[in-house]
Image (tube, helix red, strand yellow):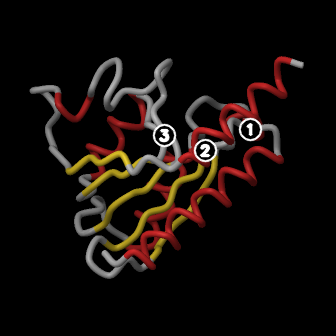
Amino acid sequence: MEQKEREKIIRLALHQAQQAFLQQEIPVGAVIFHSKTGQIIAKAHNKSEQKKSPLNHAEMIVISQALKKIQDKFLTGYSMFVTLEPCAMCAGAIAWARLDALYYGASDPKTGAVEQGAQVFSHPQTHHKIKVEKWHIPECGQIMTDFFKGKRK
């Protein structure tokens, strides 16, 4: 994927996270795109507060949108960028959706399940192994810091 396409994906996910921030949701944004062309097929942000359900994480919503759009059971041939390291629920859904790759912008030392905690993708019982790469996007961590700083006041 070219740098220009990568930057477009990151900007779109950050915009989604910003939308969540403005709606008093934990600011996480996710984008699913074609692994080879970079064509974006779905985007979402957290809506757990709005929908009153812990299942409405950005990753879960964007997976559902993408599956509906391509009208298939799996997302083979597609990848996801998410602004924050996925939790165990989302990492499991990403594996079950059979995405090609997961890219994320910031670590989540409290609830992350990729490089922390459950380490879902390196676990021997994970049925579908995918490429996982942290892209180290400072804005992804900063929006989380700003959100929780505001909550503590």
Quadrant in the picture for residue 77: bottom left
Residue on which the image places disc 1: 25
Q: CA distance from mark 2 to mark 3?
A: 10 Å
Disc 3: CA contacts within 10 A as few (<14), some (14-19) or many (>=20): many
Residue 79: image location, x then y, percent: 33, 61
Q: Quadrant of the C terminus?
A: top right
Q: Nearer the viewer, mark 1 or mark 3?
A: 3
Residue at point 52%, 62% (across, down): 10
Q: Work out whether mark 2 precedes mark 3 in sequence or the reverse, and give the earlier one.
A: 2
From what the image shows, is residue 72 above or below residue 106? Answer: below
Q: CA distance from mark 1 to mark 2?
A: 8 Å
Residue 139: image location, x then y, percent: 61, 48
Tag 2: residue type? Val
Tag 1: residue type? Glu
Quadrant in the picture for residue 38: bottom left
Instruction: Determine the secondary structure under disc 3.
Output: loop
Tag 3: residue type? Ala
Q: Nearer the viewer, mark 2 or mark 3?
A: 3
Instruction: Determine the secondary structure under disc 2.
Output: loop
Question: Relative to the observer, which residue lies in front, 152 or 44?
Answer: 152
Residue on which the image places disc 2: 28
**In the drawing, does residue 127 fall left or right of residue 107?**
left
Is mark 1 in CB contact (under 8 Å) with mark 2?
yes
Residue at point 63%, 50% (across, down): 45
Residue with the most extreme left position? 124
**In the drawing, does residue 48 fall left or right of residue 136?**
right
